[in-house]
Image: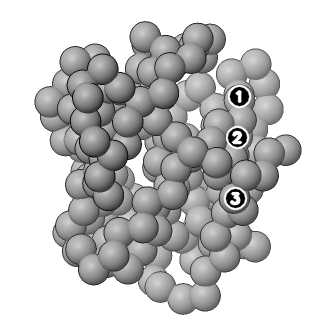
Amino acid sequence: MGFYVRNSTSNPISVAVGYYDSGCSPITYAKRGWYRIEPGRRAFLVAGSAANQTFYVYGHDSFGNWWGGDFYTDVPREAFTRCWIAGCQGQGCRNVGFDEINVGNFENYTLNLVDSTQGAFKSRRTLVAKKRKTNFKLGKFSFIKSPGKVGKLGKTRKPLYGKRK
């Protein structure tokens, strides 16, 4: 059981995920990245039942494609696990927008990331790439392999929509 992301493009994608974590306060969400997902592969990002949870996803490739939305937070260049509101400092940090994914009653949930040239319709389980010039490069210590555990459900405070620092 858990939350998965599938790379349905022809390029490797680097993905970060936001998920419920009762240990974070005042916003009870954490963020973790970077997962490198090869073309045609699926990565397991968050353990535990995905049912009735909300996840946040941001991804990019080296060709200027990105997948995200309007929930902004700071992310470092290197692999990370931290609370949603925790910032980072230094040259490798930037503020990016995550897309909100409401899972519904699915205990296992797979989100498909597709290229805008694939002509895919935007379904509930698909994010279509946006194009921009990239200047954010990941280093050799930027990727993580195993997910952490999902905290117990309780009172949640979600990230704010459209807020940038």
| Circles 2, 1 touching at the beta carbon (< 8 Å) | yes
Q: Residues within 10 Å of mark 1 (few under 14, many from 20)?
A: some
- Separation of disc 2 and disc 3 at Cα? 14 Å
Q: Which residue is mark 3?
A: 161
The x and y percentages for residue 82 are 61, 52
> Foreground mark, 3 or 1?
3
Query: Residue visible at 48% across and 27% down?
Result: 130
Which residue shows up at 70% across the image and 69% down it? 27
What is the CA distance from the residue labelled 2 to the residue labelled 1?
7 Å
The front one of 30 and 52 is: 52
Looking at marks 2 and 1 on the same chain, the residue that comes earlier in the sequence is marked by: 2
Foreground pick, 122 / 74: 122
Q: Which quadrant of the figure has residue 152?
A: bottom left
- Label of residue 93 in the image: 1
Is 153 situated above or below 111? below
Whole-percent x, y for residue 123 in the image:
29, 52
Query: Who comes first in sequence, dot 2 or dot 3?
Result: 2
Q: Secondary structure at mark 3?
A: loop
Rendering coords of residue 159 (x, y %):
67, 63
Residue occupying the point 51% across, 70% down: 20
Looking at numbered disc 2 in the image, what kind of residue is underneath it? Asp
Q: Nearer the viewer, mark 2 or mark 3?
A: 3
Report helix, strand or loop for mark 1: loop
Q: Residue at the right extreme?
A: 165
Task: Identify the image quadrant of the C terminus.
Answer: top right
Residue type, mark 1 in image: Cys
Side of 38 relative to 53 (left or right): left
Residue 94's x, y, as percent? 71, 29
Residue 144 seen by the camera = no
- Dot 3, how many residues are within 10 Å of its Cα: few (below 14), some (14-19), or many (20+)? some
Q: Which residue is mark 2?
A: 74
